[in-house]
Every structure is written in structure tokens, then in C-alpha cells.
Image (spheres, coloured by chain):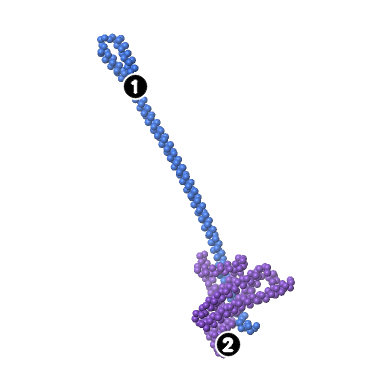
Chain colours: A blue, B purple
Amino acid sequence: MEELVTKLGVEWKLLIAQIINFAILLFVLKKFLYTPLVKFMNTRKEKIVSGLEKAQKAEEAFNKMQEQKEQELAKIHNQAQSIIAKAKETGDQKQQEIIAAAEEKAQKIIDDAKSQIKVEKDVMIKQVRSDIADLIAEATSKILEQEMNEQKQKDLTRKTLKVLKNTV
Amino acid sequence: MHISLAAEHIFTLFGFPITNTLLMSWIAIAMLIIVSIIATRKLQLVPSPLQNLVESIVETMLNFIEKVVGEKKQAEQFFPLIATIFIFILLSNWLGVVPGIGTIGFFEVDNMGNGHEMFVPFFRSTNSDINMTLALAIVAVIATQIFGITAIGTFKYISRYINFKNPILTFTGILELIAEIAKLISFSFRLFGNIFAGEVLLVVIAFLIPFIAPLPFMVLELFVGFVQALIFAMLTLVFLKIATSETH
């Protein structure tokens, strides 16, 4: 046994030195490599997971917004359409009203003119009638100056006037 | 050609012997510490290439351990020890395969007393020294006991080994104790044997055919180095899991 140990080169000093070496390595690696790195990798993992979640949420929100926007747009479009239709309707109505009013006014003017004309015509006819009566009387008197007395003259005038009245 | 089972002494520092394997382990440890400090000095959300590499290694190991243990919290508890064992053994083994690393050295008159000159390399694969592998085995076995005690309680844990409730339990307790010692031996000799054999193989092949022929063996040694690191770490992990389980 003793010989085996020396042949193999087992030396207590070296053995302990190597144990200490390994312990130092273990300690240093644990302190500078494993602990910080594993911690760091875990934080990164969490960060990535939360980042992915956030991205998904953002996408969802974006989609929702897009949808809302589209709905709003459609709504606005409808409203605009209805406003235009309403405006058209009011315009048409106004037009009708204006036309009606204008027609009415024109009618009134025409009527006024007609009545005026009629009045004037009446006046003129009256005038003409009296003028004609006078003329006839004069002419008749001139023609029948001698053969007719005053009484006869008057009768004739009246007759003539009656005839005229009937004719005119 | 001279092959020594024990690591060669390079010099003595304050009465403390410094061997070429010890130097090599210092190099591996220094490399690991420097890389890990540089990689984690400025941790960025968008990782730099080095940070990315270190992260992927750490994550792969952590996931692997979690798959074996089946519990995230316990995996994180075991992770530093298992990962350190794995990385350290892997890097040490691979550093030992670096071409030409065993050719840097000096000649020394050997202690056989015949005046023969002997080549002593400055660097030798760390795990081709029984001291290193035994140290790792001791760390692994002691860590197993510590994790077991903290997980299921001192009294319960000790009752696994020393139990007088009935003769069967007493006997299995003794067997368990022997098994723990057997773990030490199997851990240390498996790693030592594989790596030492690899070293010897490379030396012999390089001696016989110096060009091209050693290449496939180097690839083989890289693979062996990886497998041994994986075995050591995996076995430690399994022993840890067994030690911390209530029912046994």
C-alpha cells in the first residue's frame, strides 16, 4: 500500500493544494459567473416575456382602435349623407315656396292690371256714349231742324239712346 | 522516452513542491476565472459574443442538470458544483491535448543514480496526476455528504450509515460506508487512468510516427476528455440527487 501510494505520487501537500485550488475556482466562478449570469438571464427572460405580452397587448389595442376608427368613419359618413339629404329637401321646399310666391305675385299683378283696364274701359265707354249721344243729337237736330219740335226731338233721342244701350 | 506515473517536481517554493500538473491546473483555473470575469463584467441585454458563448454554456449545463434532477430549485443548488467540476475537468483535459505543450521543459539528471539525463516537461495534463483527481473526488464526496445532511437532516442522514435498529440496516449501513469510500477510488482512478493513458498514448504515437499519425489520437483524446468530464460531473450529480432524496 505504502509503495503504491508513493509510486502513484500521492502527496498530502499537493492533494490539499488541489482541493484548495478547486475550492477557490468554485468560489470565484460562483461569485462572478453563475450567480450574476443566472440572475441576469432570468431577468432577461422575464423582460422578454413581458415585452412579448406588451407587444401583443399593443397589437390588440391597435386593432381595436382601427375597428373603432372604421366604425366612427362609417357613422360620420352616414351623418353626412343624412345632412346632405336634409339640405336637399329643405332646398327643394324653399324653391317650391319661392316659385309659388312668385306665381302668386304675378297673378296679383295681372289681376290688378285687368281690373284697372276694365275701369278705364268703362270710363271710356261712358265717355264715348255721351259723346256719341251728343253727336247724334247734333246731327239729328241738324238734319231735322225744321220738322221736329222740341218734344219730338226728346222722344227720338230717348229711343236712340235705348237702342244704343242695347247694342253696346 | 521516460514515462513517470507521478507528476514531476519542477521546483520547490518555501518547502512546497510545485509539480507540472499543479502548474497546469493553475493555468486552467486562471483561464476560467479571467474569462468568467471578462464575460460578466458588463452584462448586456443584447449579449456580446463572449457573453453569448458563456451564457449558452451555462444555460445548457443548467438545463441539463434540471432535466436530470427534475426540480428547478434543486438544480440551481447543485449547479455551481457540477458546472465547475465539468468545466474544470474539460478544460484541463483539453489543455493537456494541446500539441507541443508537453515539449516545453528541461533536462534533469534522474534520481536513479546512473547519470542518465531525463526530460521534464513544464506542463502535464492536470488529471494525469492522482493528486488532482483524488482532490476532485474528495470534494465531490464531501459535497455529497454536506448536501445530504442539509437536505434531510443530520440525524436522518447519519442513520443511513450507522443504524442499530435492526441487523439488516446495520449491515447495509456498513455497505453504504464502504460504497462512499469506493466512490472516492472509482472517481479518482477512472479520471486519472483515462487521462494518463491518453497522455502515454500520445507520447508513444508521437515517438513512433511524429507526423500526421498523432492527429486522430488527439481527436480521440479530445473526445475522451469530454466524456470523462461528463462522467465525473454526471456521477456527482446523481450521487447528490440520491443523497438528498428522503426515501432510500
Q: Is B168 in front, or is B240?
A: B168
Q: Quadrant of residue B28?
A: bottom right
Indicate which disc residue A16 carries: none
Q: Is A68 drawn above or below residue A160 in the view shown?
A: below
* Residue B223 on image: x %, y %: 55, 75
Subunit ID for the residue under disc 1: A
Q: Quadrant of residue B94?
A: bottom right
Indicate which disc residue B111 carries: 2
The kind of residue on which mark 1 rests is Asp
* Residue A161 on image: x %, y %: 32, 15
Q: Is A68 drawn above or below residue B195 in the view shown?
A: above
Q: Spot the residue most to the bottom.
A: B114
Q: Quadrant of residue A43?
A: bottom right
What element does badge 1 sit on?
Answer: helix
Q: Quadrant of the N terminus of chain B?
A: bottom right
The kind of residue on which mark 2 rests is Asn
Subunit ID for the residue under disc 2: B
* Residue B171 on image: x %, y %: 71, 74
Which residue is at 34% across, 25% downward?
Answer: A117
Q: Quadrant of the C terminus of chain B?
A: bottom right
Dot 2 alpha-carbon crowd within 10 angstroms: few under 14, some 14 to 19, many 20 or more: few
Res. B28 visible in picture:
no
The residue that label 1 is drawn on is A122
Which residue is at 31% across, 13% downward?
Answer: A157
* Residue B63 on image: x %, y %: 58, 67
